[in-house]
Image (cartoon, rainbow, N blue to C red):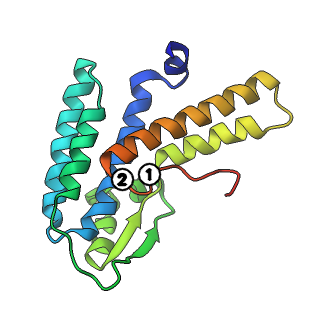
Amino acid sequence: RAALARALGGRRFDLVLLGDVLIRAGTSWRPRVTEPVLADRALADARRRLEQALSAGRPVREVLVDLGRALRALPRRRIGSGDFVRVRLTGQFFASTTDGDGGYRLVRWLEERGARVEPPAVAEWLSYLAWQAASDDDSEPARRRHGARLGAALAARYRTYARAAGAEPAGLPDMEVL
């Protein structure tokens, strides 16, 4: 387990995954609730508590579970079949992964018009890099094994965090399918 933590970069790696999960939780819940500001408050509280937990070296799962409960408890909008138009952001990295002024309020603008926005997760890119290393037939076997282990560990940790927080999708895409 310690070797796996070192391979994943320890807490720095968690910061990337937690950032992705918080963004996904926000973009998957804000369009569903009657008052998106309440979802924003729950996310802000979770960010504050995550910062405290990470600074103190405490586990973060409880904070994510509380966030998921808070988001599920919010009053939901009633829309036809409950389906939303899914919008996948691509393009300039900073604008597509940043919510707010840095992204020209693009995510909020789309959500206000009924879209369920899926900004790209940094973890997806890391998963792709691990898959590339694992799939490279010209690489040494040790590099391929390391890439495969890293990709599996990344997917498992992301899935654990995303499910706890109620973020959707709760997993990373399968690179073989893509």
Q: What's the mark number on residue 151?
A: none
Q: Position of residue 160 (x, y in %)?
A: 42, 39
Residue topped by disc 1:
170
Residue topped by disc 2:
167
In the displayed structure, 136 sits above or below 42; it is above
Q: Left of 22 or right of it: where is 130?
A: right
Residue at 24%, 22% in the rendered image: 55
What element does badge 2 sit on?
loop
Q: Are marks 1 and 2 in contact (CB under 8 Å)?
A: yes
> For the residue marked with disc 1, what is the amino acid?
Ala
In the displayed structure, 158 sits above or below 149; it is below
- Residue that lies at the very extreme toward the top in this rendered image: 2
Q: Left of 49 or right of it: where is 120?
A: right
Residue sitting nearer the eye, 71 or 14: 71
Which quarter of the rendered picture does the C terminus lie within? bottom right
> Number of marks in the image?
2
What element does badge 1 sit on?
loop
Q: Position of residue 102 (x, y in %)?
A: 31, 56
